[in-house]
């Protein structure tokens, strides 16, 4: 079967995430990526209800990502005409992005420590973290989220699945960044404004 897959660029009847030996690779990495996220969400359910600065952005992220993922997975299985021609290349590229995004998220957990929350919650006098990736960009955890969502879309091997995952990420995290930066500026004032002038949002020196 692997030899046949390698020599056949036409779409398969199923996405590779449901085909041996690709399926176990994808699902093990998928669960390992999201298990810490689910654990964080469960631990902070009470905090989410008492974070007025969040303006509902946490809920938007959870609902948006869930809906986007369900749609992307459904499209990958039901609309095989949209399959990427070289699905194996897309699959392994997607897996690499998924692993890279997960690693960057874990890095952000370590750098922020107790300041890493699923909801927007800024306290007066809170430290502006400039360690690690935060030296160059303000929101590396959302950069990681883009990598994870884009990686899933590519691993699904479908152009529309990829477009859905990326579009939903732009919507939910674009909203979160606006809410978060407003709260940070209002609470921390000039120190955070100075940090904004010295850094980019998502990519060093670019964006």
Image (cartoon, grey):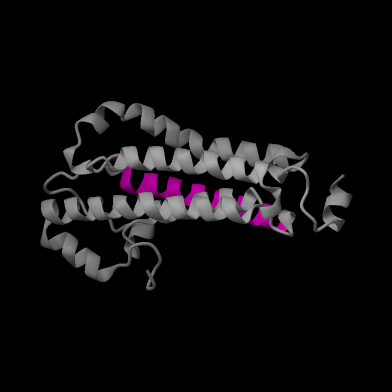
Highlighted range, magenta: 89-114
| Residue nearest the observer in this picture, 3 or 104 | 3
Vertical relation: 167 (above or below) 57: below
Tell me if 94 is positioned left or right of 35 in this view: right
Image location of residue 163, percent across then percent down? 53, 56
Whole-percent x, y for residue 20 in the image:
78, 39
- Can residue 121 be seen here? The reply is no
Residue at the location (37% across, 42% down)? 61
Quadrant hosting residue 44: top left
63 left or right of 33 in image = left
Residue 194 shown left or right of residue 119 in the figure: left
Total numbered labels placed on residues in the image: 0
The percent coordinates of residue 42 (x first, y second) are: 37, 27
Q: Residue at x 39, y 49 (%)?
A: 108
Say whether residue 108 is visible. yes
Q: Residue at x 34, y 41 (%)?
A: 60
- 134 on left or right of 93: left
Write the residue at 37% across / 73% down: 205
- Which one is in front, 75 or 174? 75
Residue 106 falls within the magenta-colored stretch: yes
Residue 120 falls inside the magenta stretch = no
> Main structural element of the magenta stretch: helix, strand or loop?
helix
> Which residue sits furthest bottom?
205
Quadrant in which the C terminus appears: bottom left
Residue 27: x and y in percent read 63, 37
Classify residue 113 by image quadrant: top left
Quadrant assignment, res 1 = top right
Observer-nearest of 94 and 117:
94
């Amino acid at each position: 079967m692997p030899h046949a897959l390698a020599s056949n660029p036409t779409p398969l009847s199923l996405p590779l995430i449901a085909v041996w030996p690709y399926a176990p690779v994808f699902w093990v990495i998928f669960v390992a990526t999201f298990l810490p996220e689910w654990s964080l969400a469960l631990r902070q359910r009470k905090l989410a209800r008492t974070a007025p600065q969040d303006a509902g952005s946490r809920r938007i992220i959870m609902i948006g990502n869930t809906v986007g993922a369900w749609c992307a997975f459904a499209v990958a299985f039901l609309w095989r005409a949209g399959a990427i021609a070289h699905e194996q290349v897309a699959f392994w590229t997607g897996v690499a992005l998924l692993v890279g995004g997960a690693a960057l998220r874990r890095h952000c957990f370590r750098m922020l420590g107790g300041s890493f929350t699923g909801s927007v919650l800024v306290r007066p006098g809170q430290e502006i973290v400039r360690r690690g990736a935060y030296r160059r960009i303000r929101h590396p955890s959302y950069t990681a989220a883009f990598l994870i969502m884009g990686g899933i879309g590519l691993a699904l091997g479908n152009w529309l699945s990829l477009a859905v995952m990326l579009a939903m990420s732009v919507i939910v995290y674009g909203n979160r960044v606006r809410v978060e930066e407003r709260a940070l500026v209002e609470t921390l004032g000039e120190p955070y404004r100075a940090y904004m002038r010295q850094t980019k949002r998502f990519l060093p020196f670019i964006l």
